[in-house]
Image: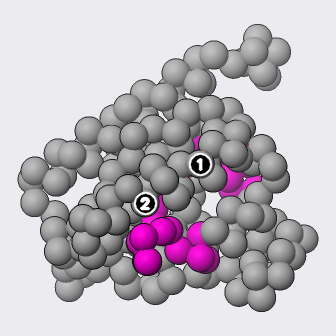
Amino acid sequence: MSGIAIITGSVTARSKTAALAARIAARLERDGFRVTTVHVRDLPAEDVLFGRVDSPAVAQAARVVAEADGVVIATPVYKASYTGALKAFLDLLPQFGLAGKAVLPLATGGTIAHVLAIDYGLRPVLQSLGARHVLAGLFLLDKALRLGEDGLLEIDDELGGKLEEVVAPFVDSVLRAGLALPPREAAA
């Protein structure tokens, strides 16, 4: 069974971005993936800001990413970029901390003017961390997302279809990578 790490850059507990991450996690779990979500906001702020990679919480979060076959990054967009909290966490990963991994970037934001935040802000960082494949991401407008009373994300069918259009190739990319293991690793 392949493992997926979901990293959320939202700084609030009840957020559309976190709900989006939970929706993706449920979808991936239905496909048989083992999913672990890292909410950057839950890591000790001082450890993240001061780069304390030996902090137990930071080390565990980095281990989740290291052991994953694929990574989903979900972040709100503030001031035309992904969150500083997410940037601080990504800075703590080793230079090639995403090597060999498929990565799916997802972003939420208040205006269509931020749609390029994935390609111009986030994608270069993910590629510099050695991601094997950074898939086409998806930007979702806040006004198209609703948080239900239960905290679950409500989206219309059209947007749900677009979300599936980016998740399906991510799943395929993770599965293809698993088939291409070197013989000694596949036999283990």
Residue located 62% across and 32% down the image: 132
The answer to whether 165 is drawn above or below residue 144 in the figure is: above
Earlier residue among tags 2 and 1: 2
Residue located 61% across and 81% down the image: 42
Residue 149 sits in which quadrant?
Answer: bottom left
Give the class, few, some or many, for how many residues have Cα within 10 Å of label 1's Cα (few <14, many ≥20).
few
For the C terminus, give its image quadrant. Answer: top right
115 left or right, relative to 3? left
Give the spatial CA distance, label 2 vs label 1.
Answer: 11 Å
Q: Amino acid at mark 1?
A: Pro
Residue stretch rendered in magenta on the structure: 63-86
- Farthest right residue in view: 54
The residue tagged 2 is 117
Look at the numbered disc 1 and give the secondary structure of its residue. helix
Question: Which coloring applies here?
Answer: one colour
- Farthest top residue in view: 183
| Residue 162 locus on image (x, y percent) | 21, 46
| Residue 38 locus on image (x, y percent) | 59, 66
99 left or right, relative to 85? right
Which one is nearer the viewer's eye here, 77 or 80? 80
The residue tagged 1 is 124
Which one is nearer the viewer's eye here, 90 or 39? 90
Residue 146 in view of the camera: yes
